[in-house]
Image (cartoon, rainbow, N blue to C red):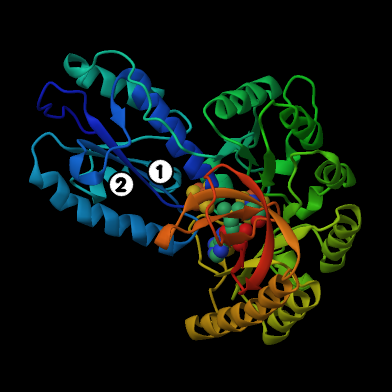
């Protein structure tokens, strides 16, 4: 932290939170906003109006870091425009670079660890105390869907991944704390909750040892909750109990995100994923048998160190055969400090990009085919907003985006007959 900041004005400072990265960062941004409101700052400000900007960063790929670096560049000018403005940075780049960021970016005022924000919050409270008048109400939220972290950190050591280094060891939150937070969210109007963890299916309540399916059954009973999802599962711990919970709990949506990363056993070994392609496919078959109407999604990395043509072709075949509903495909990005960083990043950039495009095109056709099979069928849609031209949109239990023909209230849950489909969305009325 640099100090002291020049405090200008006697009004409670307005805070703009900028965020990049995964759902964990969305949850962290929400909890920061709550923390600021508690000490009397006003979160939810547009950048132009803000006095303090907080960047919640991601380090999973170089591209994510480049975006934050670009944002910091833009903010240099923003800070110059008005005296008293300040910039803080937190999130996963802090775990990687620490306070070195303060040296690299001269206009950055604070760097803090998102796992221990209390010191930063106390510092801000002391600094602005003359302008603070106790807690301010959070701006009314019209949010229907929220993320609820249940387990933090990750104990896996996938050789390409920086997350365990920047998010630390696994720590499960007590089950009662999770349920209380779910109740508070529902009281504020939330109807869909996604339970979060890098490896959410290794959740264990610290006192009783109860697992994720059991925790889901507790959250399922929160009055007023309509939908529950969970992210992200490791194939190694995808138990039958978890699948039964999805099938049987009323709010649990028929959606399973199970990152495979590669369809080649040799590549999976180099990634240290601890399962084979056959193990993975057995899990999927079991899930599809236990959960009717299940939608499956996955993550794939192309161009990992040493990925041969035949290893990539194995991934291509697996994606073709499994027919996922959605596949998130990324080109491998070497991350300092990881085990894979010591190996040569030897798949040329053009070849990574060619493999990525081929997989994207394959999945586009599969998603189109799977969505078109829904034409004429009725799907349950939670209306989440009104888009361009006043058209309502929302998602199905399987997480497909639907545009609704005709009027609909935000928050309504409708049965919609699908009239047409593209690879990315459905349209119906
Ligand atoms: N915990 C989850 C799992 O086990 O797959 C995923 C967490 S990670 C934040 C999200 C995705 O980023 C991963 O599934 C992987 O596909 C991708 N990813 C992680 N490290 C990467 C890297 N170095 N290069 C490219 N993609 C990466
Ligand atoms: Fe990263 Fe692997 Fe942990 Fe997922 S399970 S966060 S890919 S180390
Ligand atoms: Fe990025 Fe950190 Fe998530 S590295 S993907 S924001 S856990």
| Residue 295 in sight in this render | yes
Q: Tell me, yes or no, whether the two marked residues, 1 and 2, touch with CB atoms within 8 Å.
A: yes
Q: Is mark 2 within 8 Å of ligand 3?
A: no
Mark 2 neighbour class, 10 Å CA radius: few under 14, some 14 to 19, many 20 or more: some
Disc 1 to disc 2, C-alpha distance: 8 Å
200 horizontally vs 406: left or right: right
Mark 1 sits near ligand 3, with its Cβ under 8 Å away: no
Q: Residue at x 84, y 47 (%)?
A: 243
Q: Residue at x 68, y 44 (%)?
A: 230
- Residue 427, given in percent of the width and then of the height, sits at 60, 66
Q: Is residue 159 visible?
A: no
**Quadrant into which the N terminus falls:** top left
Residue nearest the viewer, comparing 370 with 167: 370
Q: Which mark is residue 94?
A: 1
The tag on residue 151 is none
Name the spot of residue 180 as percent of width and height, x first: 63, 21
Question: Residue at left 72%, top 24%?
Answer: 206
Tell me the element at label 2.
helix
In percent of width and height, residue 297 lies at: 69, 61
Read off the residue under disc 2. 101
Q: Position of residue 255 (x, y in %)?
A: 73, 53
Q: Which secondary structure, mark 1?
A: helix
């Amino acid at each position: 932290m640099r100090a002291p900041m020049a405090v200008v004005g006697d009004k409670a400072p307005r805070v703009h939170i900028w965020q990049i990265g995964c759902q964990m960062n969305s949850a962290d941004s929400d909890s920061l906003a709550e923390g600021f409101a508690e000490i009397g700052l006003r979160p939810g400000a547009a950048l132009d109006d803000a006095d303090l900007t907080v960047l919640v960063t991601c380090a999973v790929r170089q591209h994510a870091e480049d975006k934050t670096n670009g944002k910091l560049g833009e903010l240099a000018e923003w800070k110059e425009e008005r005296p008293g403005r300040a910039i803080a940075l937190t999130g996963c780049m802090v775990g990687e670079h620490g306070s070195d960021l303060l040296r690299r970016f001269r206009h950055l005022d604070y760097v803090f660890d998102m796992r221990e924000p209390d010191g930063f919050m106390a510092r801000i409270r002391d600094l602005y105390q003359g302008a603070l008048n106790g807690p301010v109400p959070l701006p009314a939220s019209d949010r229907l869907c929220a993320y609820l972290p249940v387990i933090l950190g990750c104990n896996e050591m996938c050789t390409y991944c920086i997350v365990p280094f920047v998010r630390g060891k696994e720590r499960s939150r007590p089950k009662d704390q999770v349920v209380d937070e779910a109740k508070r969210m529902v009281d504020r109007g939330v109807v869909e909750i996604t339970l979060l963890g890098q490896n959410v299916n290794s959740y264990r309540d610290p006192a009783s040892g109860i697992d994720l399916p059991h925790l889901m059954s507790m959250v399922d009973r929160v009055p007023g909750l309509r939908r529950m999802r969970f992210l992200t599962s490791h194939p190694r711990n995808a138990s039958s109990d978890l699948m039964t919970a999805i099938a049987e709990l009323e709010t649990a949506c028929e959606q399973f995100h199970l990152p495979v990363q590669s369809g080649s056993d040799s590549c999976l070994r180099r990634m240290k994923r601890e399962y084979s392609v056959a193990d993975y496919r057995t899990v999927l078959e079991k899930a599809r048998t236990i959960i009717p109407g299940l939608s499956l999604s996955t993550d794939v990395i192309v161009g990992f160190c040493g990925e041969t043509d035949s290893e990539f072709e194995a991934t291509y075949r697996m994606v073709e055969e499994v027919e996922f509903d959605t596949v998130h495909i990324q080109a491998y990005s070497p991350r300092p400090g990881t085990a894979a960083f010591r190996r040569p990043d030897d798949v040329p950039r053009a070849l990574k990009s060619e493999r990525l495009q081929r997989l994207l095109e394959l999945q586009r056709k599969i998603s189109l085919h799977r969505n078109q099979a829904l034409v004429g069928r009725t799907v349950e849609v939670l209306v989440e907003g009104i888009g361009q031209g006043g058209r309502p949109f929302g998602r199905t239990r399987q997480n497909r985006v639907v545009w609704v023909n005709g009027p609909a209230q935000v928050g309504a849950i409708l049965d919609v007959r699908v009239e047409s489909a593209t690879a990315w969305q459905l349209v119906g009325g």
